Image (cartoon, rainbow, N blue to C red):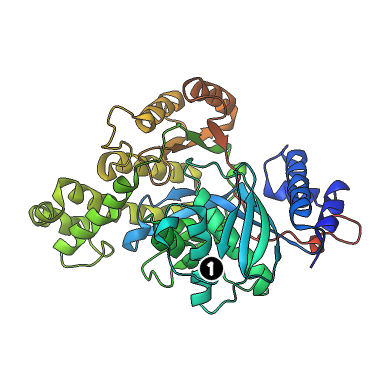
Amino acid sequence: MATAAAYAEALRRGALDPVLAELYRPGDVAAQRARYLDLLDCFESRVGPGPAVLVLAPGRTELGGNHTDHNLGVVLAAAVHFDCLAVARGNDDGVVRIRSKGFEGEIVVDLGNLSPRAGEADTSMALVRGVAAGLAESGRKVAGFDACVDGEVPMGAGLSSSAAFEILVGRIFSELFNGGECTPLELAVAGRAAENTYFGKPCGLMDQISCAAQGILSIDFADPALPVVREVDFDFERTGYRLAVVDTGGSHADLTPDYAAIPDEMGRAARALGQAHARGLTVDAVLAHAGRIREAAGDRGVLRLIHFIEETDRAAEQAEVLAAGRMDDFLRLVRRAGDSSWRLLQNCISATDPLDQPIPLALTLTERFLRGRGACRIQGGGFAGTIQAYVPDACFAAYAQYMEEIFGQGAVMPLKVRRPGFERISLDMIDGEGRA
């Protein structure tokens, strides 16, 4: 295991610059080098010199399959360059201590008791304890460690900052105590269990798998215990379009009931037709028995069930057209997906504050700016947060200026897709001539 000082020395002489260039956007290398050095310095000052692991977990963006994973559907997702970075070292006292940049205090979790604690719900401690419990249950070793973390996944921006943190914690356990052998699916399952059972937020498995496996992934949840994950080989940076998200500034606070209502209503609607989940139903069957579904799940349940069926098929088709390099067809499907989320799924406006509608505003402004070029849609869970946009390179700067006049400086965030193979930074990535 390399030392923190060895990592710092390699960074200072630029030996890891090619790795940083692979991980982040053009022009970000110097800033990321400084970020890594700052975190290593923080670690040495708090934990002391010696061996350490340097691990990463990216955020993710959903490309297709809006709210389909929790009903055994298909999604298309991609890991992005915004990430959580950690320097960590094992200890002998069975306690996890994490100092996170930008946050007061320290996350402290005693691994002697891995049961959920009511007082920890909705905290980072709950996520750490839950991930440890999930890995231990699957037969992996968990033990105490000290770590310093720097998270650059924007919170509340629909890029899954919580899932990135869960995967980061799991990856530390994997690298320090399990020889780096924990699979992406193991880490994802542990992360979802932590979020569902320990943190108290309902979610599917898409976020965690995307953060753990990286790249562009088509994920079929027909068997939720063993989802089929297929990597899609495609480079958005060669299409003439810029993939970006726009943070509308809407808060995710108090939106859990909105999120929970979606799988609940889809489930009630499916059970009205004799199924435990929506997967396998057809739109014809829904329309033929709409009255029965309305009684069980309301009008919105009917609409959300139709969205699920069509969105699952659409996400599978999106993967196929991307793999074939058909960007125009992909954008057509993105526009249809966005329309379905708005009209059928109805996750663009929260019922708790109907006058606050930043998502519809951002979508409307983007559509009018693009005038038929590119595409836009809701990003992630919805109700607040971000939209996703595909903007022609030639007018991206003008688009960013236009949107940021409404939503604030830095609201438009161009994304780079993170490819697999960079879950841990190793000095073995440097060749004999000091190049990565």
Q: Is residue 320 visible?
A: no
What residue is drawn where x is 11% and y is 53%?
290
What residue is drawn where x is 59% and y is 25%?
397
**Disc 1 residue type (three-letter):** Ala
Residue, disc 1 = 132
In the rendered image, residue 428, in percent from the top left (x then y), is placed at: 81, 64
Is 55 or 112 nearer to us in this picture? 112
Q: Quadrant of the N terminus?
A: bottom right
In the rendered image, residue 21, in percent from the top left (x then y), is placed at: 74, 46
State how many labels appear: 1
Residue 197 versus residue 369 in the image, above or below: below
Taking 433 as reference, is 399 left or right? left
What residue is drawn where x is 83% and y is 59%?
430
Is 138 or 409 nearer to us in this picture? 138
In the rendered image, residue 250, in percent from the top left (x then y), is placed at: 41, 33
Determine the image quadrant of residue 393: top right
Direction bottom: furthest residue:
139
Q: Secondary structure at mark 1?
A: helix
What residue is drawn where x is 62% and y is 41%?
102
